[in-house]
Image (cartoon, rainbow, N blue to C red):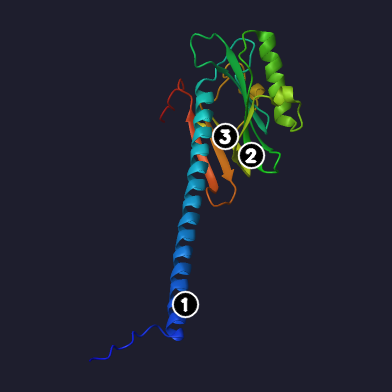
Amino acid sequence: MTATRPTRGFTLIELLVAITVMALLALVSWQGLEGMARAQSINRERSDAVLTLQTALSQWTADLDATVALSQARAMDWDGRTLRLTRRSTDSALPVVYVVAWTLRTDPAGVARWYRWQSPGLTGRPEWQQAWDRAAAWGQDSSSSNEVRGTELGLVPLEAWQLFYFRNDVWGPAVGAAALGAGTPLPDGVRLVLSLPPGPALAGVLTRDWVRPTASAPKSS
């Protein structure tokens, strides 16, 4: 009768080696998953920042395109800190205008951010003047009342911003409405220069030019 050979199991050392290998594989797998999650988070943050910037620039262009020069009402004014505009409604059925302002200010979290302010729809000269003055107060005073700041929207973080006007066939620093004059209430072009702060999403200097739709082409010499 043949004797049955006893089944040989794993030794303690073999078990320890196997457990160690499995632990290393689990650690490597976890690090890989963590790296993928981090990369997805960075990509998502960057995509959100790009989308926000694109939306802000689209609104900026739309405001400039809709800027209108009315009798006894300024179309555009730059005071070195805030740009104020008088713009028409995009709805032709609403015969109203809006006062819009853009400025750089610090948000409640202490982050310098590009802000936009818009008045309600306006139908008369007194209403326009009141909204125009409110926009100036909003742009100069970050502690303005809720009545003045009720329609503001914080957009992208910024370190600084600059404006240039294209007038008389040359680019130059933006000027106030008084310098533009009643005969030319709008420049032929506006150059926007945004200084984006360092960060994981967007950084550096961004320049965007706008040309007035009714501007005439420069004459060649």
**What's the residue type where badge 1 is placed?**
Thr
How far is the residue under mark 3 from the one under mark 1?
A: 66 Å
Residue with the mark numbered 2: 113
Q: Position of residue 204 (x, y in %)?
A: 54, 48
Residue with the mark numbered 1: 20
Residue with the mark numbered 3: 164
Residue 32 vs 51, above or below: the answer is below
How far is the residue under mark 1 from the one under mark 2?
A: 51 Å
The residue that appears at 65% across and 33% down in the rendered structure is 103
Q: Earlier in the sequence, mark 3 or mark 1?
A: 1
How far is the residue under mark 3 from the one under mark 2?
A: 20 Å
The residue that appears at 45% across and 57% down in the rendered structure is 36
Determine the residue located farthest toward the left in the rendered image: 1
**What's the residue type where badge 2 is placed?**
Arg
Comparing marks 3 and 1, which lies closer to the viewer? 1
Foreground: 191 or 131? 131
